[in-house]
Image (spheres, helix red, strand yellow):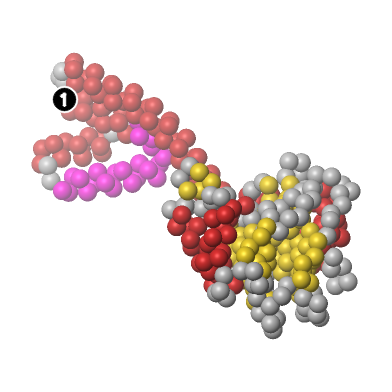
Amino acid sequence: MEKYIKLLKQYIMTEDEEALYKADQFSKESLQKDFSPDEIVQLHIESLLNLYPDLSKEMRLSLDFLLQTMISYGIAHQEFQVLRERQRELKSEIDVAAKMQKTLLDTSIPKLDDLEVGAISVPAKIMNGDYHHFIQDSDGNVGVAVADIIGKGIPAALCMSMIKYALDSFPDTLVQPDAILKLLNRVVEANIESGMFITMFYGFYDQKSHHFSYSSAGHEPGFFYSAKDGTFEEITAKGIVLGVKKNANYERFTRKLEIGDMIVLLTDGVTECRRGQYFIEREEVIEVLQRYKDLHPEVLVKNVFQHFERLQDFELCDDFTLIVIKRNK
C-alpha cells in the first residue's frame, strides 16, 4: 500500500516517465504474486482515498462501480485463461496426432512401365478423414484402397492406421477385392466404436492381363475413362459400408484397361464441393476431368484439386482425395 501510494503521488505531482516506469515494475511484481485485476483496482482506490480523503460522492461511486466491474472481469478473465490453456494443450495434442497420422499412413505411388498413377489427398481440417493406400506385389501387380471414415479426429486416425496395417498384413496371394473387403469388414466391426463406419473402394490391377478388378463398401462411385470413346462413365459397384454387418459379402467387378484408359477414384469431398450454398453436379467433375485428361495423372490430380479449391474460395468443405490410374502402353 505504501509503495503504491508513493508511486501514485509521484506521478500526480510530477507526471514524469520515471513514475510510469516504476508503475510498470510494480505491475510485474504484482503479477508474480498472482494479484487479480480487481485487487489492483482496490489498491488504487484505497491509495487515492488516502491521498484525497475529500473526494466527491460522485467520484467515490464511480470508483465503487469500477471495482465491481473489475471483480466480474477478473472472474471471467481467469476462466478464459484456463479455457485458453486447455485449448492450447488440445491443439498441441492434435498437431502431434496429425503428424503421426501423416507418418503412419504414408504410402508410395507405384512405379510401373505400363501404368501412370497420380494421387492427392488434402484434409479440410488438421486431421484427415480420408485414407488411400497402394500395395504392390513382387509381380508388379497393384492394389489400391480409398476410404472415407464416417467420424473425424483422433479416433478416425487410429481407425485408418488399423486398416492400413491390416491390409499390409494380408498375404500376396490374397488379391481379390471382394475377399479383402470381407476380411476388413470383420476387422472393423470387431474393433471400432459404435457409430463409426467406413466406406471403402478396393481395386486390383493385374499387370499381365491389364484387368482392373474392384469392389466397393458403400463408397463414392469413381469413373472409368475410355480412350477409344473419349468419354467418362461412372464405376458402379454396391456394397454395405464396413463395420455395420459382421458377415457382409461384397461383389467383385472387372474392367480391362486398354492403352489410354483411366480409372478415377475419389471421395465425396470431390463430388460434393460447394459453389456458394449449392453442391456441384457430378457432371461438372466429369467436365473438369475432360479438360485435363491428356495430362500425366500426377499433374491431372493437382489441376483438378486447384480447380475445386478455387471454386470453394480456398476453404475445403470436406477432405479431398483423388486418384487417377492410367494405362500408357
Question: Within the image, what quadrant is residue 132 found in?
Answer: bottom right
In this picture, residue 268 sits left or right of residue 174: left
Residue 216 sits above or below residue 39 on the image: below
Q: Please give left or right for residue 32 compared with residue 6 in the image.
A: right
Residue 4 appears in view: yes
Which of 91/235 is in front?
Answer: 235
Residue at 76 percent across and 71 percent down: it is 256
Q: Work out which quarter of the rendered image holds the N terminus and state it.
A: top left
Q: Is residue 24 magenta?
A: yes
**x, y percent for residue 49:** 21, 24
Residue 10, horizontal then vertical, whole percent:
15, 40
For the C terminus, the quadrant is: bottom right
Q: Is residue 293 left or right of residue 236?
A: left
Return the x and y of residue 218 as percentages of the image width and height: 74, 50
Q: Position of residue 162 (x, y in %)?
A: 76, 58
Secondary structure mostly seen in the magenta stretch: helix
- Three-letter code for the amino acid on which mark 1 is drawn: Tyr
Instruction: Check disc 1 and report the residue beneath it.
Output: 52
Q: Residue at x 28, y 21 (%)?
A: 64
Instruction: Give SS at disc 1.
Output: loop
Q: In the rendered structure, does residue 124 fall within the stretch colored magenta?
A: no
What residue is shown at x 32% (from left), y 34% (from top)?
40
Q: How many marks?
A: 1
Region in magenta: 17-38
- The answer to whether residue 180 is left or right of residue 9 is right
Compared with 163, 197 (above or below) is above
